[in-house]
Amino acid sequence: MSRPARGQALLSDDVVRIEEWRRLPAAVLPVLGVAAAYYVAGRLGLLQRVVLDGAVVTALWAPTGIALAALLWRGPRVWPGIALGTYLTIERIASFHPADVGILAGNTLAPLCAYVLLGRAGFRVELDRLRDGVALVFLGGLIPMLISATLGTWTLVATGNLALSRFWPVWTAWWAGDAMGVLVVTPLLLTLRRARIPRDGYRVVEATALLVTAVTVSLVATRSSLSLLFLVFTVLVWAAVRFQLAGSAPCALLVSVLAVLAATDHAGPFADHTLLEVMVTLQLLNGAAALTGLLLAALVTEQNDVRLRIERICEDLAEVVEQLGPTKPEH
């Protein structure tokens, strides 16, 4: 190789290295952002943790919803952020031991599996079809979270922190908490990314009324000694029909958070019940609220899109008929 050619090759290598260094922040920052969001959400979730047979569980584990939303936005390259966030969260509960790798692996693999399954199903992040809502429920939440619950609970059994006879209650609570994180948090994050403030004054007034009503009804339903939990579904239906996912997702999160707080305090309909009864009631409420808001909003959005397409087709046909119609004779 001649000296000029060798010099050009070295210069080309330097340019490649510079480009790689420039791209490094763009690759690292999303990972760190996911880790930070996962850790913060985990810290908040642990404020309302429940110790079940010696194991720490939460009724709503928001980090799983954040992890799946990050994967849907940025792709699988952000998975190290999920693993790092899980590690930091475990460290917050107790010192990290080598055996805790099972929990770390489960919390990382579960959202990755959900991402793969949703991709194979043709999932769209707009959630504008009923099939997208159903896919998120089963392929994003219920099925993949079996991985995190199973690996996590078996890790507790293997390390002696949980008796084998108490495997299923802890496994069920773990699975339900992770699944609820996906069903409640992921739709909200996917919606916030494209949310817009209504320009119509009437819509602003209705949105404000919905917010006030949702807070009031949720507080009454979760704090009253009467069995009024069913009232929250009237608000969820209103939000889904009138505002679709942009309205139902925040309302579902509001209901879930207030219900978790009431259950932790053993207040309202959760008073005078055993821990198992409280957890069952809470998870059924959160699951029903999330499914109602998500699926109804997706169904209404799909029907609205079909109506708009039909209207556009009718307008196009009207223009074609007008152009093909007989012309007026000239005088």
Image: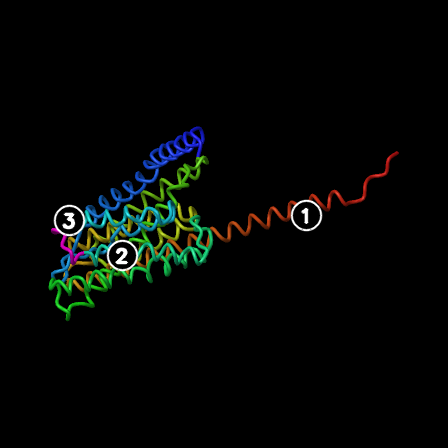
Instruction: Please state which amino acid type lies under the numbered disc 1.
Output: Leu
Instruction: Please state which amino acid type lies under the numbered disc 3.
Output: Glu
Between the C-alphas of marks 2 and 3, the distance is 19 Å
Is residue 83 placed above or below 275 in the rendered structure? above
Name the spot of residue 167 as percent of width and height, x first.
Answer: 18, 67
Between the C-alphas of marks 1 and 3, the distance is 64 Å
Cβ atoms at labels 1 and 2 below 8 Å apart? no
Cβ atoms at labels 1 and 3 below 8 Å apart? no
- Numbered disc 1: secondary structure: helix
Q: Determine which residue is flagged by label 1.
A: 317
Between the C-alphas of marks 1 and 2, the distance is 50 Å
Mark number displayed over residue 178: 2
- Binning the other alpha carbons within 10 Å of mark 2 as few (below 14), some (14 to 19) or many (20 upward) gives many
Earlier residue among tags 2 and 3: 3
Earlier residue among tags 1 and 3: 3
**Of circles 1 and 2, which is in front?**
2
Give the residues in magenta. Answer: 92-100
Instruction: Please state which amino acid type lies under the numbered disc 2.
Output: Asp
Name the spot of residue 100 as percent of width and height, x first.
Answer: 17, 56
**Of circles 1 and 3, which is in front?**
3
Report the quarter where the C terminus lies.
top right
- Numbered disc 3: secondary structure: helix
State yes or no: residue 197 in magenta: no
Splitting the image into 4 quarters, where does residue 51 fall?
A: bottom left
- Binning the other alpha carbons within 10 Å of mark 3 as few (below 14), some (14 to 19) or many (20 upward) gives few
Earlier residue among tags 1 and 2: 2
Residue visible at 27% across and 52% down? Answer: 256
Outermost residue toward the front in this view = 2
Q: Determine which residue is flagged by label 3.
A: 91
